[in-house]
């Protein structure tokens, strides 16, 4: 009888899940919402600046694990053998010589630059452009080549350089940088020295231009050419990286006590949430696994010998062992997916948050109730109304680049758009067009894989949108013209971490074995509707032309800057 | 001591204004909102179908005039010498042999096709396309040539043909057709026979392809080629047309009694609201007069000898005497202006009208109050927030074709669009982009007049938006890079009708004399801000490219139909 714990750090909250390693049965779970983040601290959405405070993560670690264990009873806690962690990424933080995030040090407590730079922060647009420019022109290796040939402002080096340039005080104190997914396991085993803590293969390979063919991170010469501010930093980072089946160490006494666990518990190397979600949803070779939440992460694994030297253009990278050890993990994704629906909800909230909010003669509790009701139910109500709309009749067509475009061909300068608006275009019709645009964005990725010779044998979906929105899932199935299976577990990502922890703890030898024993199977399958497939085939061509126009306009604007 | 009454039928309501003919002093006014229209009856905004019931007009005529007179006292009513009427247009209705709108006859009371087809109804898109195609290809005169070379679905013949084709029952009963602005004076004098009632020069010339050079309406041969359903209709319409200074007759006993006026009151020929608004706002040669409301009407008058044979391409027409007798009236306009702001308000109302509406535990009166507060104050709140936004920083750009494009180059198939959306784009930023788009649309018209050799010496504005929205007016001044004077009278249109009535009644010999005595002058002048002029010069170029893209996509879609 043994159990493992998966700890899944999402954008808004962290979840701990206790799982029976024999059956995959979910014994207990607890979610902790980041309190500082929830208040909107350290963020400026209009500037795409999104930072998270390490205290949100620390408090969440303790509360979520303890909370999940409380649901299981002491007997389970005593038999926990492993814990693995997944997080968003690239979400790096500046640390001192001891590996302590600067925002935990005096003088930096309220400095957003000293906090974790969340995956969706786009403040480093300029730096990403410079990296791309230099990688293509400096005469040496193009270090972006395993990352789809386009480096993104959402990634490690761009973010580091941006913050170093911007913040002189921080520049003096930042000794090294650590990804969120590497910091938590380091904390748990009590070894946070930046030179010793274990770095995740997926974070390094997909976001930091690490590749074994380069002997690790990019050349010092390249980095210094990019900016002398980076001089010497490479030596304060890492050479080796580790897949999710690697055992970082055992739980420190301090954390064993805090969490109420035996100090014998094995701690696995961290990984990105999407990758462990793909594990949890039972990814197999040539199965496109889509984590569909605020953004999407679209993953495929393929045997290295079959993929050979084939480099897929314009995706987020292909890294040996980044998802499943022994397989090449290919990653793509959309910068915004559910975030677009949430943006539209928030847009429609304007009168409630401004006009209603300022109304005299209306009780505060009533105002609060109205705000909550609208925030909680708007997307469901919009979906219900949108389901009845014929996309041909509504004449609307949207472009899903409200947060830039991650793949294919990363370009964070791109922006969203809507055409076909009439005085009769109402909120459900626009909502449906936005959903369709996210499905078209998904198809662009599928088309790219196929064009580059990576076949797709099936589509698996997991994540909040996959489980909660039949409307979205049906439209994605219709646009892709492929059936989509939705993972049964509500916590596929945390489950994937728990599977990895079972391998780390030695309960299983390989990830596929853990998947076989612990997998939850699928709860639904969406099948494309031939009539809609035909409609969307036409609209998709229009979507591509609209995209080409916006890309042309964007490069024109960039050139005039 | 004498008074005249201007009756101004707008889109949502009718206003009567009693004016002192010596000074232009406004003695009394009353507004009547159309009750059936207000309930949304006989309309389908998603299909751009907008019909109005004649009873809304009839009830409104009596209530508004009686209400306005009540404010003045019996002494004023006794000294009323003239009444003139303006309405929206082209707003035709099918009538029987007696000139009675079919919707006033048994069996047609609830039939939208038997009602007035409101100016902004776009159900006749296909018919307009056919008229344009035939006018260019049939080998005879191009009857659209005095209407800018493009016939619109908003106009007389397209609407008639559409309804005749669609409604067999109506086809049998429809003996002739009458514009709203011709029907009301006909009623007032008690002569509604379609062959005898007096037809307005501006309705006929701008919307019905009437021109003295063709000897009146288009050739029977042309009309029959368009559709045999039109056979013989020309003979049941009209040959002669009348300017607004023409006296149709005197008030019938019946209407004198109903309105509480002497039966000696002179009734003027009707005209379109915009044209009489231009009078009221003291239009003079080469002054661009913009009526800025739900849509815009942009008018210029020029001496015939100076304009010569010059035909301005792509506007809504140029007709001798259509605005001021003795001058050529040139008319252009935007299909939607304030309607776009109202559309956005209605879009944002969605949660209030759906989510809040369905909330349990919330009093009906509270819900009503919230709905009213949001509907009444939203545009003002949005404007206030939008004023602080730098258009460069928001990155948004919109296209103002949510109701098609009237001028330049009418194309009702075009639709609106927004680009530059990010997850940070909020309601005020989008609102501002929409306002800017309407200003860019205004500039397209100015550019066309100038390109075609019609100079613009000044800009005069009137209408609801001109008076109520400093934000909009400043942006229009910045985009046009021209100062704009706003007419002082809140009721410039009704005042224009009262001025015309003073000429009709013989108080003045000419319109300019009436304008001089009765004009209210200007209350504000907006001056362009050089910094904003520069910003908008760049955005305007982008607006034009965006428009070109949407036009290309629209013709592609039309070709695939």
Image (cartoon, coloured by chain):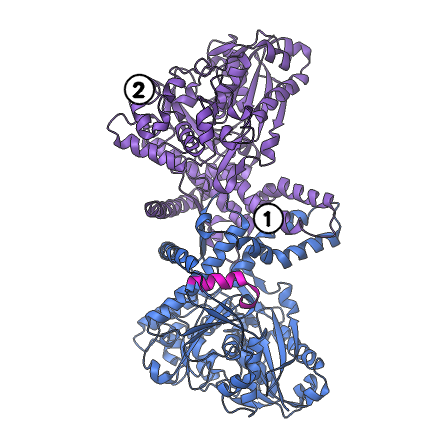
Chain colours: A blue, B purple
Q: Chain of mark 1?
A: B
> x%, y% of residue A490?
59, 73
Closest to the observer, A197 or A438: A438
Q: Which residue is mark 1?
A: B350
> x%, y% of residue B90?
45, 27
Residue at 61% in and 53% down: A349
Q: Is residue A59 above or below residue B476?
A: below
Q: Which residue is mark 2?
A: B214
Tell me the element at label 2.
helix
**Most common SS among magenta residues:** helix
Does residue A512 appear anywhere in the picture? Answer: yes
Closest to the observer, B477 or A422: A422
Q: Is residue A231 magenta?
A: no
- The range drawn in magenta is A466-479
* Side (left or right) of A29 relative to A193: right
Tell me the element at label 1.
helix
Q: Chain of mark 2?
A: B
| Label annotation for residue B437 | none
Q: Is residue B365 above or below residue A65?
A: above
Q: Are marks 2 and 1 in contact (CB under 8 Å)?
A: no
Distance from label 2 to label 1 (Cα)? Answer: 50 Å
* Side (left or right) of A427 relative to B480: right
Quadrant of the image containing the N terminus of chain A = bottom right
> x%, y% of residue A540?
39, 58
- Across the whole image, how many numbered discs are drawn on residues? 2
Q: Is residue B462 above or below residue A40?
A: above
Instruction: Name the N-terminal-most of marks 2 and 1.
Output: 2
């Amino acid at each position: 009888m043994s159990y493992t714990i998966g700890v899944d750090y999402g954008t808004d909250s962290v979840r701990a899940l206790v799982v029976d390693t024999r059956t995959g049965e979910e014994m207990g779970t607890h979610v902790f919402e980041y309190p500082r983040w929830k208040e909107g601290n350290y963020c400026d959405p209009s500037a795409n600046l999104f930072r998270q405070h390490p205290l949100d993560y620390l408090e969440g670690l303790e509360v979520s694990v303890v909370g999940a264990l409380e649901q299981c009873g002491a007997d389970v806690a005593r038999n926990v053998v492993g814990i693995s962690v997944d997080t968003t990424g690239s979400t790096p933080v500046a640390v001192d010589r001891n590996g302590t995030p600067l925002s935990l040090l005096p003088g930096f407590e309220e400095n957003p630059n000293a906090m974790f730079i969340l995956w969706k922060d786009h403040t480093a647009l300029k730096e990403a452009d410079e990296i791309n420019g230099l990688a293509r022109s400096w005469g040496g290796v193009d270090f972006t080549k395993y990352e789809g040939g386009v480096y993104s402002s959402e990634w490690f080096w761009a973010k580091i350089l941006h913050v170093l340039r911007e913040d002189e005080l921080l520049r003096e104190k930042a000794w090294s940088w650590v990804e969120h997914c590497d910091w938590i396991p380091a904390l748990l085993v009590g070894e946070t020295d930046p030179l010793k803590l274990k770095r995740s293969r997926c974070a390094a390979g997909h976001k930091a231009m690490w590749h074994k063919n380069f002997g690790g991170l990019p050349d010092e010469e390249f980095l210094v050419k990019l900016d002398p501010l980076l001089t010497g930093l490479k030596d304060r980072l890492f050479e080796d990286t580790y897949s999710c089946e690697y055992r970082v160490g055992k739980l420190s006494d301090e954390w064993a006590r805090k969490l109420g666990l035996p100090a014998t518990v094995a701690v696995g190397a961290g990984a990105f949430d999407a990758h462990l979600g793909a594990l949890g949803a039972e990814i197999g070779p040539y199965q496109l696994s889509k984590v569909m939440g605020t953004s999407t992460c679209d993953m495929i694994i393929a045997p290295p010998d079959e993929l050979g030297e084939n480099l897929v253009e314009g995706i987020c990278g292909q890294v040996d062992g980044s998802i499943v050890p022994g397989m090449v993990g290919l990653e793509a994704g959309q910068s915004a997916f559910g975030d677009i629906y949430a943006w539209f909800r928030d847009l429609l909230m304007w009168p409630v948050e401004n006009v209603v909010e300022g109304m005299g003669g209306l009780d505060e509790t009533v105002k609060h109730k109205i705000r909550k009701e609208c925030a909680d139910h708007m997307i469901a109500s919009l979906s219900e109304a949108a389901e009845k709309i014929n996309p041909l009749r509504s004449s609307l067509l949207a472009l899903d680049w409200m947060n830039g475009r991650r793949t294919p061909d990363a370009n964070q300068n791109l922006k969203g758009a809507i055409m076909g608006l009439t005085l009769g275009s109402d909120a459900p019709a626009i909502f449906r067009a936005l959903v369709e645009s996210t499905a078209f964005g998904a198809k662009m990725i599928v088309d790219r894989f196929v064009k580059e010779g990576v076949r797709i044998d099936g589509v698996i979906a997991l994540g909040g949108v996959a489980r909660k929105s039949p409307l979205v899932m049906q439209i994605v199935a219709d646009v892709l013209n492929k059936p989509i299976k939705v993972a049964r577990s509500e916590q596929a990502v945390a489950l994937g971490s728990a599977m990895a922890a079972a391998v780390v703890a030695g309960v299983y030898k390989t990830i596929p074995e853990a998947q076989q024993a612990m997998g939850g199977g699928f709860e639904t399958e969406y099948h494309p509707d031939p009539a809609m497939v035909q409609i969307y085939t036409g609209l998709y061509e229009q979507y591509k032309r609209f995209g080409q126009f916006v890309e042309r306009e964007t490069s024109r604007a960039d050139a005039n800057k």
